[in-house]
Image: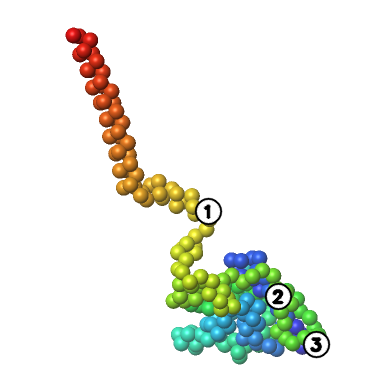
Amino acid sequence: MAIYKFRITFEDFDDVVREIDIKSNQTFEDLHKAIHRSTGYNAEKSSSFYVSTDNWLKGDEIAYLPSERKKDRVVLMENSKLSGFIEDPHQKFYYIYNFDRPYDFHVELVKIVLDPDPNIEYPFLAKSSGEAPKIMEQNSPQSVDPRGTAVSSEFDFLNEMNFVPEDTDELEAMGEMGINAEERDEEDETEDSDEFGDEFSDSEGYEDESHKDDY
C-alpha cells in the first residue's frame, strides 16, 4: 500500500501551505476532513474535488454533501478511493470548500512512498505553514475565526467591502469630487463674500478720503 503526500495551498493565499500524507486506499472524504483539521474550518460543508489538468482546469467532480441538483451527476467522496483517480505522479486536483462561502485550493501530489510508517496514523499532517484566513459565516456580520471564535461584535464595513489600505487614495479622491461638497461650497461662498466685502470696504474708504480732499 502506497502513501500519497499532497501539497495543499489556497488559491489566493500562497503563503498558507499544508502537506498531508494519506494512504492510497483512503478516500477523498478522508482527505477533505484532514485538510480542515489542519485549517480549523468546519468540514461539514458542501465541497468538491475536481480532477485537474496541469493548468488547473477542472474535470470530473468528486463531491461531499452535493446539492439535489448535482447528486446524479457526480461521484461521492466517501465512495471514491484516492488511488482510483491518480493517473500521474504529480496528479493535481482543484478543490472548492464550502460552496456557500467558497475557498479555492490547489491540491497536488508531490511524492509517493511505497511503505507506510507503522507508527503513524493516516491521514497525517506532515507540514503546516501560514495561518488559514478567517472566514465570514453566512448571514452573520461577525468575522469568525476558523476555530469558532468571534473576532468582532460589530459589522466591519471596510472588510466586507474588501477594503485594502491602498484604497485610501481613492476615498480621498472621492471626497474631493463630491463628498461633503455642500459644506465645501458653503465655505467657498463665505470666503468669496468676505473677499468682496473687504474690497468694497476699502473702496468706500478711499472715496470718502478723496471727497474730503476736494473740500
x then y, percent, for residue 213: 23, 10
Single out the residue that lies furthest toward the left: 215
Amino acid, disc 3: Asn
Labelled disc at residue 119: 3
Crowding near pointer 3: few (<14 within 10 Å), some, many (20+)? few
Residue 211, image x, y percentages? 20, 13
Q: How many numbered circles are shown?
A: 3
User: Mark 1 and 2 residues: CB-CB less than 8 Å, in contact?
Assistant: no
Residue denoted by label 1: 166
Q: Give the residue at x 67% y 70%.
A: 17
Q: Is residue 215 left or right of residue 196?
A: left
Residue 58 locus on image (x, y percent): 57, 74
Secondary structure at numbered mark 3: loop
Find residue 23 and report its image quarter.
bottom right
Q: What kind of residue is marked 1?
A: Glu
Near-viewer residue (135 or 87): 135
Q: Quadrant of the N terminus?
A: bottom right
- Disc 2 residue crowd, few under 14, some 14–19, many 20+, Cα 10 Å: many
Figure check: 92 above or below 81: above
Instruction: State how far apart marks 3 and 1 are (Cα).
Output: 50 Å
Name the residue tied to disc 2: 19
